[in-house]
Amino acid sequence: MKKILGLAILMLILISATRFTAPKPDNMHSIEGTWELISFYSYDDGVNVSDTMPKADGYRQVKMYYNGKVMWSRYVPNDNNGRFGYGSYYITDNELHETIIYGDAEMMKALDTLTEFVFELDLQSDTYSQITLDEDGNKTFSENYRRID
């Protein structure tokens, strides 16, 4: 009987100890998923948004991030050529790095001079902005996305 009582007390101690364990901190939001472009921002002084430009009617751009890979596609009405690109990505606390390795004909021409794209990243749970910086680190332009999956 003493053994059973001792075992019961030990189990109570272990169960109550788990109750006081600190909760795990939330992980950084993940960019993995499917995102649709919703608008563009222009910055006038490198800090403040000077203009918000909605997408043109019928314009659609979607980006997908999964397992270190990125793929994007764009449809522009009245443009017979679609646009797309594929490559790899990684994020830090405040940067998005994309290395595009192939895409449509126009993208392949652009890849002759530039393959890695680095953006300031403003990542929330259901939205993100990839912000282009000039050589002095001032904000110039952003693409703003909404999670669709």
Image: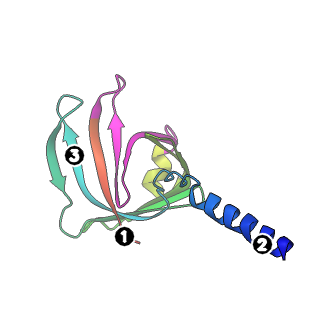
Q: Is residue 93 above or below residue 15?
A: above
Q: Residues within 10 Å of mark 1 (few under 14, many from 20)?
A: some
Question: Is residue 131 highlighted in magenta?
Answer: yes
Tag shown at residue 41 = 3
Q: Is residue 95 above or below residue 71?
A: above
Q: Quadrant of residue 59?
A: bottom left
Tag shown at residue 12 = none
Label 1 secondary element: loop
Query: Which residue type does callout 2 highlight?
Result: Leu
Q: Where residue 112 sits in the image (x, y, percent)?
A: 52, 41
In the picture, measured across the screen, residue 1 lies left or right of residue 44, that is right
Q: Quadrant of the N terminus?
A: bottom right
- The residue pinned by badge 2 equals 5
Q: How many marks?
A: 3
The magenta region covers 111-139
Tag shown at residue 148 = 1
Work out how far the residue at label 1 is from the one at label 2, CA to CA, in angstroms.
55 Å
Comes first in the chain, label 1 or label 2? 2
